[in-house]
């Protein structure tokens, strides 16, 4: 496979100082050879950020795709996540992720869900230690409330750098975004298509105006709003198309029109 970088990869700065590509490739529900092929197509198409998790059972395939690509490890941002029922064996879980991925470190390690609905302070202490040791370059959470994030900060002095939460035009919430930013937490959206709609007339109209697809408008809207977006597809054509979003720009009015779908 010939590595190519046809896309300009905009990034967002994390509180720890490292940069995270705003576009990534989601891999939930991709298993076995389908996961390896899809992650490989994504890297070939220019994605430089892969999102996996212990719970997706595809870390080995994602790691294999990374090696197949011929890209340097440092050129690709890799996220994995610890399942909430792994409390008490956090470190072993990370070591197993690294072994499966075939890498010495992950760029971002997330607590996948609040353990037993709590902030999970004891787990977070292990996350902080893993970051201090360089096994995870950045650490964060997923599906956390702001109160739970504050609890981690108060208990450990370390604020999660990222909160990966469900996000789409229909879920846009300016106050929630601002509250994360006030805390220095980058919002990473998941399920950009599944949690929204691709046939809303506003999205269709904006897409037609730019000669793009509604899915591309949704991805572009995340990027311009500096919300990390990780669309998933098993289909090569869609993987390429979902990342083909760097040849147009949404106007301020268009961004606002898409924001206003939130809660609709
Ligand atoms: N932290 C968490 O708890 C959590 C939860 C959910 C997801 N995630 C992460 O976020 C990623 C993305 O979320 P997601 O997988 O739930 O959903 P998504 O990316 O919003 O949507 C994926 C679905 O949309 C279809 N699709 C992809 N591109 C399309 C296009 N251009 N036009 C029409 N349909 C298209 C896909 O079908 P095909 O595959 O057939 O193309 C698939 O059914 C996940 O893969 C995972 O990495 C995290």
Image (cartoon, rainbow, N blue to C red):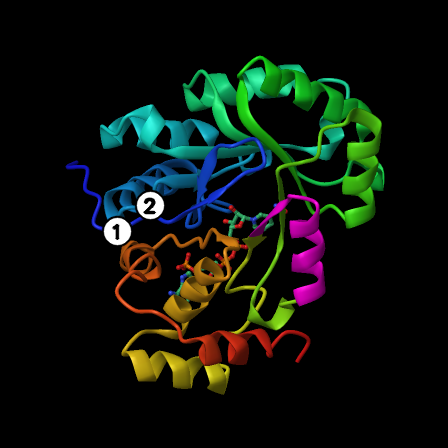
The residue that label 2 is drawn on is 47
Quadrant housing the C terminus: bottom right
Task: Count the numbered circles shown.
Answer: 2
Q: Residue at x 62, y 20 (%)?
A: 93
> What is the C-alpha distance between the residues marked 2 and 1?
8 Å
Q: Residue at x 55, y 57 (%)?
A: 191
**Would you identify the image quadrant in which residue 150 lies?**
top right
**Would you identify the image quadrant in which residue 151 lies?**
top right
Magenta highlight on residue 176:
yes
Instruction: Determine if the C-beta at disc 1 is less than 8 A from ligand 1.
Output: no
Judged from the image, the secondary structure of the residue bearing numbered disc 1 is: loop
Task: Mark 2 and mark 1 in contact? Answer it, CB < 8 Å.
Answer: yes
Judged from the image, the secondary structure of the residue bearing numbered disc 2 is: loop
Across and down, in percent, residue 180 comes to 68, 51
Q: Of all residues shown, which one is farthest toward the left? A: 2
The residue that label 1 is drawn on is 7
Q: What range is drawn magenta here?
A: 174-188
Relative to 116, is 98 on the left or the right? Answer: left
Quadrant housing the N terminus: top left
* 153 vs 179: above or below: above
Across and down, in percent, residue 19 comes to 45, 37
The one nearer the camera, 183 or 102, is: 183
């Amino acid at each position: 496979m010939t590595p190519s970088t046809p896309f300009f990869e905009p990034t967002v700065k994390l509180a720890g100082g490292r940069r995270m590509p705003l576009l990534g490739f989601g891999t939930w529900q991709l298993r076995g050879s389908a996961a390896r092929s899809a992650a490989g197509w994504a890297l070939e198409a220019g994605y430089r950020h892969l999102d996996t998790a212990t719970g997706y059972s595809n870390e080995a395939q994602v790691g294999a795709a990374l090696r197949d690509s011929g890209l340097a490890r440092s050129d690709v941002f890799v996220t994995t996540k610890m399942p909430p029922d792994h409390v008490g064996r956090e470190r072993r879980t990370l070591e197993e992720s690294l072994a499966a991925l075939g890498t010495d470190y992950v760029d971002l390690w997330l607590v996948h869900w609040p353990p037993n609905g709590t902030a999970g302070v004891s787990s977070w202490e292990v996350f902080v230690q893993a970051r201090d040791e360089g096994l995870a370059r950045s650490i964060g959470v997923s599906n956390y409330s702001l109160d739970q994030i504050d609890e981690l900060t108060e208990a450990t002095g370390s604020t999660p750098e990222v909160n990966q939460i469900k996000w789409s035009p229909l879920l846009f919430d300016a106050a929630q975004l601002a509250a994360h930013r006030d805390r220095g937490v980058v919002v990473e959206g998941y399920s950009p298509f599944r949690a929204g709609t691709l046939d809303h007339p506003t999205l269709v109209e904006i897409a037609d105006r730019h000669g793009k697809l509604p899915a591309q408008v949704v991805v572009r809207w995340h990027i311009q709003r500096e919300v990390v977006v990780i669309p998933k597809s098993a289909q090569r054509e869609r993987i390429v198309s979902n990342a083909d979003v760097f040849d147009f720009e949404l106007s301020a009015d268009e961004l606002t029109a898409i924001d206003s779908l939130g809660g609709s």
